[in-house]
Amino acid sequence: MGTQQPVAEVAQGATAAQELLNDISASGGVTSLQIVDTVVGTGAEARTGDIVTVNYIGVLPNGTVFDASQAHGKPFTFTLGAGQVIRGWEQGIPGMKVGGTRIVAIPPELGYGAQSIGQIPANASLIFQVELVSVGSGATQ
């Protein structure tokens, strides 16, 4: 059985995440990259160049879910720093530890910018809940 976080620490993370979401909802968007760890992992730390696997849910500030790894039936794997994901992920995921969950609020310029993609309108702020499932070395694969 893994190490469990104290209830107060988990509650503090959840409260901080809710405050961030309330602020974003009230202001209508994100002006800079914001990160709140809701659960601090205890496993390997994600670094640039690592192959990472995550579960995620992406929502717009109005609460619309636009993507989720669960909808694809499996976690998402990519190499940090290789330009395979939006810049908000490239900057918001390093430092996470396996088993951790983080809210990453991303301004438009670190997301899709002026592009409209699917349910994501142009110049949209993005909010992701990201759970780090695994970290592997890019050098060995």
Image (cartoon, rainbow, N blue to C red):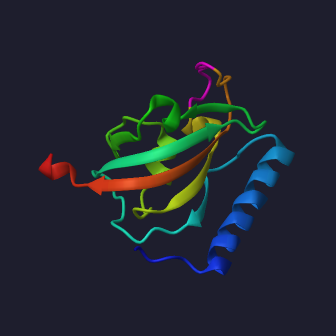
Asked whether residue 117 is drawn in magenta, I would say: yes
Give how far across and how far down residue 139 sits, in percent: 15, 51
Residues 42 and 33: in front is 42
Q: Residue at x 56, y 35 (%)?
A: 111
Above or below for 17 versus 1: above
Question: Relative to residue 105, is residue 115 depicted above or below?
Answer: above
Give yes or no for residue 21 being in the magenta stretch.
no
100 shown above or below 76: below
Quadrant where the image shows the C terminus: top left
Number of marks in the image?
0
- Where residue 132 sits, quadrant-wise, is bottom left
User: What is the x, y in percent for residue 21?
Assistant: 75, 52
Quarter where residue 106 is shown? top right
- Asked which quadrant contains residue 99, the reply is bottom left
Residue 72, given in percent of the width and then of the height, sits at 46, 30
In front of the other: 106 or 134: 134
In the picture, measured across the screen, residue 13 lies left or right of residue 50, that is: right
| Quadrant location, the N terminus | bottom left
The magenta stretch is: 112-118
**Residue for point 21% across, 49% down:** 138
- In the rendered structure, the answer to whether residue 42 lies left or right of residue 121 reads left
Examine the rendered structure and indicate whether residue 52 appears above or below residue 78: below
Please give the name of the residue rendered at 41% of the width and 41% of the height, measured from the top-left corner.
75
Of residues 8 and 115, the one drawn nearer to the viewer in this rendering: 8
From the viewer's perspective, tell me whether residue 75 is left or right of residue 111: left
Magenta-colored segment: predominant secondary structure: loop
Q: Where in the figure is residue 29, as x and y percent of width and height?
A: 75, 41
